[in-house]
Image: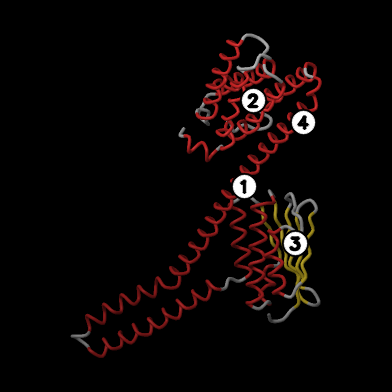
Amino acid sequence: MKLSKRLKEDPYGVSSFVYLVFPIIALFSDQIEGPKWLLILMIIIFSIDYYMMIFHVNDHTSKVKRLIYLLIHLIGIVYFCYAIGSTFVMFFFFGSFALPYVYRVSAKSLENYLYLTTIVMTSIYLITQYTPNAIIVVVIDLIVVIIAFTNFQNVENNKAKEKIEEKNRYINLLIAEQERQRIGQDLHDTLGHVFASLSIKSELAAKLIDIDIDKAKTEMQSVNQLSKEALEKVREIVDQLKFQSFREEVASVSHLLQETGIQFNFENAKIAKSINKGRQSILSMVLREAVNNIIKHAEATKVSGCLVETDTGYLFKIQDNGKGMEPSATALNSIEERVKLLGGNLKIISNQGLTIEIEFKRGEL
């Protein structure tokens, strides 16, 4: 892998090459445990292994090779701590970034258990051998472990975000496909036979024009009338695209939830007939937003809803059996804004799932 690419993916790992200067400097010290040739050999092996971990470990590297690289790396750190001094526990910092970002393993992986065990065993040895530096060793180890688990959590969060984004893309495709099919069906049902009639009558008029001019005129008048009807129907289709009744929206989200494997039941959608178009449109958007939130965030298997007529107006309710959501969640902001347009009251209950209740009065917007 090129240096520039690895710098973008893992700048911490590449920049940590600078730490290799410290064991090299230690070669000129007289306070070394063991022969210098062994330290030189270990520095060379450690540096090569360091390079391999940064530039050659990827998703296609075999598990055996990955473990060998990690073992050599950990053995090198342990040796440096033994031969040079306790401050070399700082070399464990690289592992706190390499495991989540280069190795792409989880906090519960064999590699991480091996990494943590080495840190603990090395720390115990250093604390017993270098008592004055015990506090420094403990502090460095704690920082390393905290950074490691923070990085593992960041990776998991990024994976979760990617899954949500993928799910959202799928939902958007389903919604777009539903709209495409609905528009196509409307065009086929309303305009298909009109254009067929126009074609037949115009051909007939062309044949009659030299035989019976009056009949040809009659057919052309019929063509003119059909054209006006077609134009009117196109306008109706456009109006329908601008407005979808609440019952149609219930049918639409029912199909959407069925596609995502969630059971759905809605009672008394027919009551919406008595609600004016403006309020129906807002209520439809609330239902759509609530269902989208359920699919994206709730992890629910069942959704139910109802529309009830009260003494002063209407009560709209939708609930799921998912993991719930905080009432202050940003995903609910758009619902709150639409409830304000209705002039209604919003009640959100997060207990064994999420329940949304909206009460609004009769009348125009």
Sequence-earlier tag: 3 or 4? 4
Q: CA distance from mark 3 to mark 1?
A: 25 Å
Q: Which one is closest to the eye, mark 3 or mark 4? A: 4
Q: Position of residue 66 (x, y in %)?
A: 56, 24
Q: Residue at x 43, y 68 (%)?
A: 188
Q: CA distance from mark 2 to mark 4?
A: 23 Å
Q: Which residue is identified by label 1?
A: 161
Sequence-earlier tag: 2 or 1? 2
Q: Which residue is identified by label 4?
A: 139
Asked whether the residues under the numbered discs 2 and 4 touch, taking CB atoms below 8 Å apart as contact, a structural biologist would say: no
In the rendered view, tell whether residue 365 sits above or below residue 128: below
Q: CA distance from mark 3 to mark 4?
A: 49 Å
Q: Is residue 6 left or right of residue 249?
A: left
Name the one closer to the observer, 339 or 320: 339
Q: Which residue is identified by label 3?
A: 356
Q: Is residue 155 left or right of residue 86?
A: left
Name the one closer to the observer, 190 or 283: 283
Asked whether the residues under the numbered discs 3 and 1 touch, taking CB atoms below 8 Å apart as contact, a structural biologist would say: no
Q: Amino acid at mark 3?
A: Ile
Q: Residue at x 18, y 85 (%)?
A: 210
In the rendered view, tell whether residue 97 sits above or below residue 124: below
Sequence-earlier tag: 3 or 1? 1
Q: Position of residue 169 (x, y in %)?
A: 55, 52
Q: Which residue is identified by label 2?
A: 111
Q: How is the image coloured?
A: secondary structure
Q: Which one is closest to the eye, mark 2 or mark 3? A: 2
Q: Position of residue 157 (x, y in %)?
A: 65, 43
Q: Secondary structure at mark 3?
A: strand
Q: Which one is closest to the eye, mark 1 or mark 4? A: 4
Q: CA distance from mark 2 to mark 1?
A: 25 Å
